[in-house]
Image (cartoon, rainbow, N blue to C red):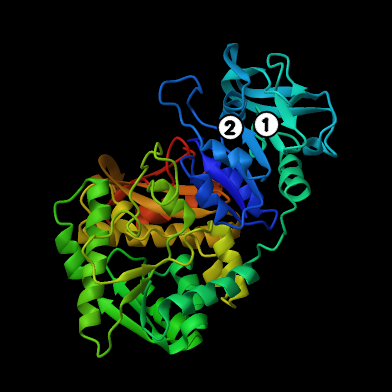
Amino acid sequence: MILILDFGSQYTELIARRIRELNVYSEVLPHTTSADIIKTKECHGIILSGGPSSVDDDGAPSIDEAIFSLSIPILGICYGMQLIAKTLGGHVMASSTREYGASSLEINEQSSLFNNVPKAINIWMSHSDSVRQVPDGFQPVASTTTCQIASFEHNEKQIYGIQFHPEVSHTDYGKDILKNFVISICKTPQNWTSETFVERSVERIREQVGTKNVLCALSGGVDSAVVAALMHKAIGDQLTCMFIDTGYMRINEGKRIKDIFEDQFNMELIYVNAQDDFFGMLDGVSEPEKKRKIIGNEFIRVFEREVNNLNKPIPYLAQGTLYPDVIESAKFGVAATAHTIKTHHNVGGLPEDMDFTIIEPLKMLFKDEVRQVGVSLGLSEDIVYRHPFPGPGLAIRILGEPTRERTQMLQKADAIVLEEVKRAGLYRSIWQAFAVLLPVKSVGVMGDQRTYQFTCAIRCVTSDDAMTAKWAHIPYDVLETMSSRIINEVDGINRVVYDISSKPPATIEWE
């Protein structure tokens, strides 16, 4: 693997994705990870990420210096480069001009890091400090008009530093630079594929579970479907799938789940109608984080209750947690300085006092990797390429109190959005398309009569992994059809708006 030590950069997870695109496994760990821990891993290379701090700040993030003695190739990016310089005896100073954005890099010396890269390329900079003097044994390699040392290396020790970000699309040949480090310098085998992931996961699951039983929580989305298929491949009849109908699901979701997993996969499926429980728990609740935590807690309580009604012990609960869920919830191996964007019900919303041991076989995967695993497991395209659906369901797409009446309105509006996206042939090119019900009423006119009803927002985005997203440029005629149908077919909505914000600064979901 390639280990990425995180110093708080907004691009850290993007580095991991770029490396995995080379069919090489990468993992993000805190910058506090010790050399002793790294020794226990099959690590071919280490990348030190960028970060918002200055290396000269009091309490600035640092590194176990013993890492430099492990004889493992190291690449420092931005803050990582500056940290290498300062730790090994170089000199870092605040720049007279902060560089943020596009710049031009001149490669002045031969370097294996820039093999087959033109001498002048466009790059993406984001720094206020720069290296003014390299440590002993290092050689400057590249520069920009305002940064004399934009890259350096110690060829013998295989330690490299670059002041720019090769992981972002704005940097020309960025993927080639990372490939040079990962493949040519680190000699990392390119064996990270969906097939090898399935093989290794099956082995790990069997080793962990043994002869015991596992409960899998199905939500209707691709993540839980892939988990169910993976667990079934590993342990067969030891798996029991359960679909809890919270009332906040899409229309006819229960029937669809039953058709897929009972008929197509011949798995044991238990359907639980818990709508009254969830609507009751969320009565009067409007705050997003409170909704998520209540739903996460109630999911576990319902599972525990239903398992107690079965005639067999089930100590394990399998969930479709993904890497973006883990990252956004500021859990598991991200920098201590990471901010919690939102609590995902299957990461931060779980109660501490639960009867299950959680199994999360997908927690180190991005969404596109999960889809590839689904294909390897034989899941149909309808399942594999289904748009993401949040664990808390429509409860977090209803701003304000998610009452039963409002949920039914949103279910109808959401169904219309998806129908029209599919009819227009846009479903596979859009990452996520859905409707949001706003607690905003406005005046309208229907049949010469005044109305005072809710507003519906349509949200369509394009993305690769949900870490970043852009609003989708839906044709006007498709938006017009969506709006007309929602207003005419959904009682209680008289106005439709289109969300044109990207992530960041907005999130994909509204709550």
Which residue in the structure is indicated by mark 1? 161
- Residue 215 occupies quadrant: bottom left
Most foreground residue, 470 or 122: 122
Tell me if 275 is positioned left or right of 137 in this view: left
Number of callouts: 2
Which residue in the structure is indicated by mark 2? 80
Tell me if 36 is positioned left or right of 242 in this view: right
The residue type indicated by label 2 comes to: Gly
Q: Residue at x 70, y 29 (%)?
A: 123
Give the Cα separation between the discs numbered 1 and 2. 7 Å
Quick one: label 2, few (<14), some, or many (20+) residues within 10 Å? many
- SS for tag 2? helix
The residue type indicated by label 1 comes to: Gly
Instruction: Report the disc number at residue 311.
Output: none
Residue 417, horizontal then vertical, whole percent: 45, 57
**Residue 469 appears in the picture as rendered:** no
